[in-house]
């Protein structure tokens, strides 16, 4: 603890493929889509987050929208660095400062990440004035955020369905015993809907429309207790080229997403088959925890429960479970030292 400690700020970042969340002083201060709008003529960033998201699919040739993260890892180094930097500058309490404080950061990363990808995350953080940078694996952060005591000699299974990857992990004694990271998550669901509309209805829709459909009437099963109402979808008719509108039901979206959900189910079963018997007994008693935005898909918990024959619990605020866990690890850095990757 030095004299200059008052110049250091602590922030926890959940760098997601779809959304970036930042916690500062125990509050979520940034919750924005991970998207950047760039001016092609001078390569300057003109908007990030929500503002850039509204431009997606509606730009002219001088503006392009980039999603700097793909499958949970940094795909565009420059854009991701500028995006992180702009998000940090927009934190209300840091805006008032005369100079940029040095930052102690905890950032979460997918469990299947390579050394090179890890270095990209760390370098991005260091360039935005990160003096101490710690990394934490997503399933670990999700477990802490859900409220699981990860230090216990007891097995817990976490499934974190984000935008780019689905992380499945069995955790015990503050370590990951067996894990699987599959690149099937929210983005793939969105693309499945676009493909289905094209092939079944000859309707070409954009990513934002597909995302809206997924949230409004997305379903993992055909039998829902209180099904959502049919939804009207507008797009371009592929045969005539004219704009048109059709009505679709949640049953159709279930058909569109079925193949991807089967692959997630298979990955869960594979992880369970690799779990040591003592931990498998624990999981049988405690059940499985779901986190991440993808876990909010209607009927997904029921479907996984039927497949695994285990009780499935959804975290109370699944979108923020990971960032809350990252924030907790940041607050108790000494306690969670063993979990953090320096």
Image (spheres, helix red, strand yellow):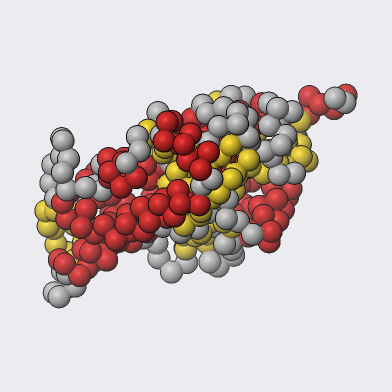
Which residue corresponds to the image point at 48% horizontal and 34% vertical from the top-left?
282
Residue at the farthest front position = 277
Which residue corresponds to the image point at 50% horizontal and 52% vertical from the top-left?
274
Instruction: For the C terminus, give its image quadrant.
Output: top right
Instruction: For the N terminus, give its image quadrant.
Output: top right
Residue at the farthest right position = 3
Q: Residue 227, percent across and down? A: 15, 39
Count of numbered circles on the image: 0
Q: Residue 161, percent across and down? A: 43, 47
Report the front residue among 140 and 15: 140
Q: Is residue 204 left or right of residue 330?
A: left
Report the front residue among 197 and 298: 298
Q: Is residue 306 left or right of residue 177?
A: left
Give above or below for 105 relative to 262. Answer: above
Which corner quadrant of the image does residue 243 belong to? bottom left
Which residue corresponds to the image point at 74% horizontal and 48% vertical from the top-left?
126
Residue at the farthest bottom position = 239
Q: Is residue 167 left or right of residue 118?
A: left
Residue 116 visible: yes
Q: Residue 171, percent across and down? A: 56, 39
Q: Residue 157, percent across and down? A: 48, 40
Q: Is residue 98 left or right of residue 217?
A: right
Give above or below for 137 relative to 38. Answer: above
Report the front residue among 330 and 11: 330
Residue 49 visible: no
Which residue corresponds to the image point at 59% horizontal and 65% vertical from the top-left?
42
């Amino acid at each position: 603890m030095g004299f200059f400690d008052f110049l250091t700020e602590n922030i926890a970042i959940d760098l997601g493929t779809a959304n970036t969340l930042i916690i500062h002083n125990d509050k979520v201060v940034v919750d924005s889509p991970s998207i950047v709008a760039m001016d092609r003529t001078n390569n300057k960033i003109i908007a990030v987050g929500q503002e850039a998201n509204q431009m997606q699919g509606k730009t002219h040739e001088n503006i392009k929208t980039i999603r700097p993260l793909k499958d949970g890892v940094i795909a565009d180094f420059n854009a991701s660095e500028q995006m992180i930097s702009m998000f940090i500058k927009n934190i209300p309490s840091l805006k008032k400062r005369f100079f940029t404080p040095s930052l102690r950061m905890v950032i979460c990363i997918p469990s299947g990440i390579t050394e090179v990808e890890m270095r990209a995350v760390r370098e991005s953080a260091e360039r935005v004035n990160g003096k101490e940078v710690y990394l934490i694996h997503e399933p670990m952060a999700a477990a802490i955020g859900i409220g699981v005591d990860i230090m216990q000699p007891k097995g817990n299974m976490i499934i974190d369905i984000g935008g780019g990857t689905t992380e499945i992990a069995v955790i015990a004694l503050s370590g990951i015993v067996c894990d699987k990271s599959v690149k099937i998550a929210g983005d793939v669901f969105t693309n499945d809907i676009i493909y289905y509309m094209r092939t079944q209805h000859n309707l070409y829709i954009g990513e934002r429309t597909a995302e809206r459909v997924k949230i409004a009437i997305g379903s993992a099963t055909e039998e829902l207790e209180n099904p959502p109402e049919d939804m009207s979808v507008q797009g371009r008719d592929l045969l005539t080229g004219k704009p048109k509108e059709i009505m679709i039901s949640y049953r159709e979206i279930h058909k569109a997403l079925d193949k991807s959900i089967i692959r997630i189910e298979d990955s869960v079963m594979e992880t369970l088959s690799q779990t040591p018997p003592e931990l498998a007994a624990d999981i049988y008693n405690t059940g499985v925890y779901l986190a991440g935005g993808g876990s909010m898909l209607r009927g997904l918990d029921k479907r996984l429960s039927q497949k695994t024959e285990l009780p499935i619990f959804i975290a109370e605020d699944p979108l923020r479970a990971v960032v809350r866990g990252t924030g907790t690890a940041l607050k108790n850095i000494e306690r969670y030292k063993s979990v953090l990757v320096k």
